Amino acid sequence: MPKVRKGVEVSIAIADAVAQADTDVIAAYPITPQTHIVEHLSEIVANGELDAEFVPVDSEHSAMSVCCGSSAVGARTFTSTSSQGLALMSEIFFIAAAMRLPMVMALANRSLSSPLSIWNDHTDTMMVRDAGWVHIFVENGQECYDNIFCSYRMSEDPEVRLPVAINLDGFILTHMIEPIEYEDDETIRKYLPPFTMINALHPDNPVSMGCFGMPEIYTETQMNREHGIRNSYPVILKAWDEWGKLTGRYYRPVETYRADDAEYCIVTMGSYGETAMEVVDTLRAEGEKVGVVKIRLWRPFPYDEIRAALLGKKSLVVIDRAISFGGPGGPVASELRSALYQKKGAPTIVNYVAGLAGRDVSRKDFRNIILEGKEKARRGETEGFTLYGLRG
Amino acid sequence: MQEIRLHGRGGQGAVTSAELIAIAAINKGNYAQAFPSFGPERRGAPVVAFCRVDDKKINIRAKVYNPDVVIVLDPGLLSLLDPSEGMREGGVLILNTKKSPEALGIRAEVPFRIATVDANAIAIEEVGRPIVNTTMIGAMIRATGLIGIEDVKKPLMERFGSKLGARNLKALERAYHEVVMKE
């Protein structure tokens, strides 16, 4: 693959990146809810363009099980799923993180049933928020492509050894054709060393994985997981930094747009960040001192960067794409409230949940949310959340 | 930025039209998006696809509500929907119809141009089937100048292969010449 800029569906570009990363094993349930990502990968493998095992399994539960096995022997491993597929996978999803098995998943974020829906929101990923995976959110096709390589670097680093999920908005990104710059294979080879699994499963050197854990040991294993994901933070920064040096495209755990001198900010995660920037440009021209803060790294949660970006602002309008029913409203707002609580200069936080199951959120909607949210903050209406656009 | 909305029926290729326009624009160095109105795919059901073209990076992740260009692939849709809904002033409505722009009697809330082409007839003669997605691109190119015929050749050949691609290109070129425009 030469360095080239092309108009391509984001799902296809992800598959191309997985192939360029010289992935060894791809295991996926090949039908609904699935995207063109694994469909195209199956073609690439069948054509002989990628020397890999493509395992079309009988369920997502099996897909994640195959991924665990292949990672354990030291094979570079990829899978992709969505919504109900992730739900079915969830049992093994937790085990992959607990057993510290490197792999990369493109998680096309979609809503969960019921009612039956195939459209985009963040309900599925929030279900597995606490599984111990590294979670990255991307906002366009280029970021999807780039983060395949960055994620393998993070995941397979001996200091990390954790599975990484790249969260991309279903349909909004997976079915979008847009320009994406591919890097040449030489650049990828330079960036991404071959995967070496320490203590890999091998008949010559037997090791035990996924053992029975008595109460005497379980607590310690969980602290090990917590240390593991916290220690991944500097490796994640380094992986993004080195990618930036090679390609000119830099990524940070928290990214801001016109936020430095802003009095208040809209906070988003995923592809909504782009529309938010567009609307903030318009509002700035009208004299609103508003900025955008985008959370790219969801786990491990970037407390320091969040505080650096947000302390001192008057208020925040946080857009969530999922609900914690009977709880604090949206998971992102909940996290921010917790991260900023009792800190000097903590802003007032107003929470909106919008765009559930693919309901379109237009520029006009963003404008309404930002301006209405600012007023709510001024009036001190900070309890709970507002379900934007609710009818009836 | 130019925003395009395409109305067709499942199987007519409205999504393919949007994709080919976007890829042609990207190939000549511009920025573009093409995406369907996401939903179950059913042959024959009304479908909508969208496209945006700009000379700078596009930062919108929402449907097109105020199009500069509307392309209607199926004349039968005119009795089901208002193709000019949300149309920007000075935009252009491009219709696959035998009728002249005057005979259609389309009322507009804002002034816009209308372009018509008998794409069904052209597609049947050149492609052999009334699949008008590529034909309508020819009309769009003439009516908007957003991309050139040269720009769309490569993505067209890549999509359809040399033999079918050549027939689609012929249909596209004919529509370019035969489109009737009313200011």
Image: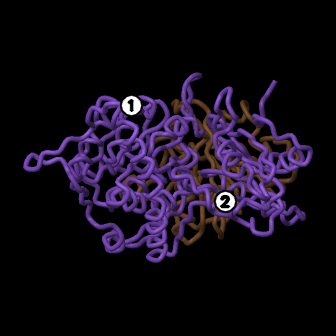
Chain colours: A purple, B brown
Q: Are marks 2 and 1 on the same chain?
A: no
Question: Farthest residue in the right direction?
Answer: A379
What residue is drawn where x is 56% and y is 52%? Answer: A301
Looking at the image, residue B50 lies above or below residue A56: below
Where does residue A20 sit, x and y in percent of width and height?
Answer: 33, 62
Q: Quadrant of the N terminus of chain B?
A: bottom right
Closest to the observer, A255 or B120: A255
Where does residue B116 sit, x and y in percent of width and height?
Answer: 69, 49
Residue on which the image places disc 2: B59
Closest to the observer, A306 or B77: A306
Q: Is residue B156 visible?
A: no
Amino acid of disc 2: Asn
What residue is drawn where x is 54% and y is 51%? Answer: A176
Residue on which the image places disc 1: A91
The quarter holding residue A217 reads top left
Is label 1 in a helix, a strand or a loop? helix
Apparent side of residue A54 relative to residue A308 in the rendered image (left or right)? left
Label 2 CA crowd tier, 10 Å (few <14, some 14–19, many 20+): some
Q: How many marks?
A: 2
Closest to the observer, A75 or A23: A75
Q: Quadrant of the C terminus of chain B?
A: bottom right
Is label 2 in a helix, a strand or a loop? loop
**C-alpha separation, residue under disc 2 versus residue under disc 1:** 37 Å
The quarter holding residue B105 reads top right
Q: Is residue A317 visible?
A: yes
Where does residue B160 sit, x and y in percent of width and height?
Answer: 40, 53
Question: Farthest residue in the left direction?
Answer: A204
Q: Chain of mark 2?
A: B
Q: Chain of mark 1?
A: A
